[in-house]
Amino acid sequence: MIDLAILGGEPVRKRPFLSSVVVDDLERQYLMEVINRKEFSRFMGSPTKDMERLLVMPSEEAEHHKNQYFSFLGGRMVRKFEAEFARKFGVPFAISVNSATSGLSAALGAAGIGPGDEVITTSMSFNATATSILLFNSIPVFVDVDQNTFCLNPAEVERAITPKTKAILVVHLLGNAADMDKIMAIAQKNNLVVVEDCAQAPGTRHKGNYVGTFGNLGVFSFQETKNITTGEGGMVITKDSVLAKKVRLIRNHGESIPDNSWDDHSLINLVGMNFRMTELTAALGVAQLAKLDENNRVRTENAHLLAAQLQELPGLKVPAYPSGVVPHVFPLIYDAHITGVGRDRILAALRAEGIPVGSGYLRLMYENPIFLRKVAYGKQHCPWSCHLYNFSRDYQPGDCPIAENLLREKFIWFYHINPPNGNADMNDVLCAFRKVFNNLDLLKKYEMDIEVPYKW
Ligand SMILES: Cc1ncc(COP(=O)(O)O)c(C=O)c1O
């Protein structure tokens, strides 16, 4: 009897997995505090008397700074969120922004990266990782990923270094930690800035230390699919007061602060952005930060359960999860040579069973036409045509074969390891996988139209 859902049988799972944000009275309490105070931003973008001190003030000190009304450092809730984030990650400076995309740009801008400079980054991430490099007119150089972590392969980073290289933008993808020991050693040897994109890895540790604290700056996202969320939002962390000062300037109309006494170097990249976080967003942030450890515990438990049970199925490689990793999405590596069934047919069968699986990103970042055709700013193909960048840099399919192979043939991602999904939900996932993998012969036998795999 045929009972695979894709062949007309009953699906294993008939209700959706939950993707709504975990909230409780704490969010309401902090939001009401902001509403009752009638303070929705309180950012002030113009200089004050103690400006120099304000700009390098550690976040914990800034929380209690006497100016409680309007401040260059933002409103009271913004400063509270920053102080708590800094405490959590054990750094002196946490600077909130309106997204991780803004945060990544501000981090690179603060480090003085600009026209003519190359930034080495991974080929596989959300596109904002790459486009944040373009904001201050620098050139992304994409390298291939490690087979197991899907993060930057340090050997490829080393191979990609040129006299133009100024920074490495590391991404801790899907909650995995990149090999920060090797990457930091390469950066030190070549005098490169390191920015860590931790959008998908808040709370992940590498050898005991939080990712985001290895490089010069770390950047987090609070967009709605992340481990904690404020709808939109981000945070930049650093231990370096000079970088903190510059990030604070870039986020808050920096160009309105300097007077003629500032030298040219201090003015670099202060072109007057507004990346500020509102008090309402920060209120959600304070409440969500208190949930980070519990949310991460549930994600970890869900992912470990799936990994332990799915490893017995043919053609599936489960993630290894070294200690300290907090999974953000659950990735499997599928081998169609072992099962004889194409990856997309498996995805379609699992989706028919009610399991929202996908094949990962739509494309690698360099496969975006912005990069393939090098069209970013103006008609002149800036920044690639900039006279300061007298190099030829092309992007094409085939540049990063490991990452391409993972996306095109191997990845099966399950997204909903997030709370409130729990044990019972994961058991449905396991039942569906077992059902499909116990019926591979049926899948092989039947001609079927393959629906387009679910994309995140
Ligand atoms: C790895 C990575 N970097 C950057 C971003 C951009 O974050 P945001 O949406 O907060 O700008 C995202 C996701 O949204 C991401 O997954």
Image (cartoon, rainbow, N blue to C red):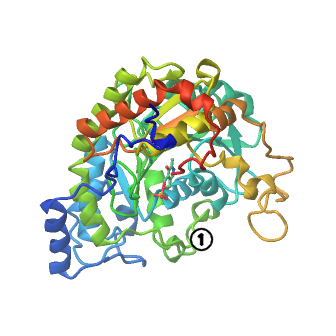
Q: In this view, does 272 lie above or below 150?
A: below
Q: Residue 141 sits in which quadrant?
A: top right
Secondary structure at numbered mark 1: loop
Identity of the residue furthest to the bottom in this view = 38
The front one of 307 and 187 is 307
The front one of 375 and 67 is 375
- Residue 340 place in picture, x, y as percent: 63, 23
- Residue 135 place in picture, x, y as percent: 63, 61
Q: Residue at x 73, y 28 (%)?
A: 159
Identity of the residue furthest to the front in this view = 1
Q: Residue 62 sits in which quadrant?
A: bottom left
Q: Residue at x 34, y 54 (%)?
A: 19
Q: Residue 47 sits in which quadrant?
A: bottom left
Residue 87 can be seen, yes or no: yes
- Residue 288 place in picture, x, y as percent: 25, 55
Q: In this view, does 350 lie to the left or right of 411?
A: left
Q: Which amino acid does label 1 sit on?
A: Val
The front one of 159 and 431 is 431
